[in-house]
Amino acid sequence: MDESHDEVKPQIIIIKRIKKVKKHGHHGGSWKIAYADFVTAMMSFFLLLWLLSLLNKSQLRSIAEYFKHPQKTGLVQQGTKINKDQKFDFYLEKGKEKEKWKDLEKEKQKEKEKEKEKIKSPLQTESKMNEGKKDKLMMDKMDKILAMKKDFEDKLASHPELSQFKNQLNFVVTADGLRIVLRDLENKSMFTLGKSDFEKYAKPILEWLTKELNNYPNQLVIIGHTDSAKFKNGKYTNWELSVDRANATRRTLINYGMDPNKVMRIIGEADTDLLDKNNGLNPANRRIEIIILTDEAVNKINKK
């Protein structure tokens, strides 16, 4: 055996160290957070822009004013208390805009009032003129009635035979004209008791009245009144008696020469309109009333 083969050569061990070079690796999840913040900020920004696009000019001016003077002014929410001494350099929507609308509404209202005044002015002038005419006509009418009343009273007082009956003849000015009242006195009746026949002394009064009534063109209404005494039989009442006495007066005046067309109405009112309301049996309640009508009163009667 060869000795050379008996020697064992030492085995050389080679250790190869590989140096690993680290490439750029990931940085964890921090970048995601940063990106999310960026996206959120952009969304907020665009949301802000969208909200700003919805505001009107007044609100935009208010926001701009706030950023100019953040310590002096700001948006005022509903219900916020404001100090009396606090001054604002701007108007909010509920301030300046409302003031503008109020001013416009006031101007429109003024214009409407002016137009109304233009329309009303001629009408008011005409109305005042008509009222003035009506007042003048009313005064003229009253003057005529008063003059008529004085004429009757003066002639009655100066009449030698009829002056004794001045307590039975009254002249009253009314809205419808002059009311002539012929009333009974105690123990001195114009009519026979319970009948429509005139007593003898009453006829000269009616004759004188006829003459005086003919001096005026006015038409007449004759009204009969009674006291509250009742008839025993019940078939003939104060209603019939009052009408019969009014009609008897009409006939007597016509017999003495009065135009029949002067009488428009004869009316019987029985004891419904007593002169002495506390004593229905007072003789003064028995009376005849002759109303000398104004033109207006005649028109009222004709319309009825």
Image (cartoon, rainbow, N blue to C red):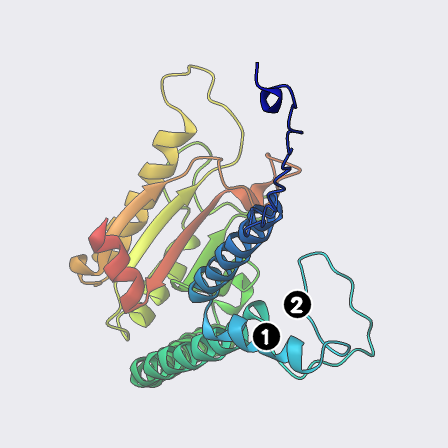
Tell me the residue that label 1 is attached to.
Answer: 62
Q: Amino acid at mark 2?
A: Leu
Residue 164 vs 72, above or below: the answer is: above
Q: Amino acid at mark 1?
A: Ser
Spot occupied by residue 153 in the image (x, y as percentages of width and height):
49, 74
> Looking at the image, can residue 10 be seen?
yes
At x 26%, y 49%, the residue is 265
Q: Nearer the viewer, residue 157 or 241?
A: 241
Q: Are marks 2 and 1 in contact (CB under 8 Å)?
A: yes
Spot occupied by residue 192 in the image (x, y as percentages of width and height):
43, 38
Tell me the residue that label 2 is attached to.
Answer: 75
At x 58%, y 21%, the residue is 5
Spot occupied by residue 249 in the image (x, y as percentages of width and height):
32, 49
Residue 43 vs 276, above or below: the answer is: below
Q: Quadrant of the N terminus?
A: top right
Residue count near mark 1 (Cα–Cα under 10 Å), binned few <14, some 14–19, many ≥20: many
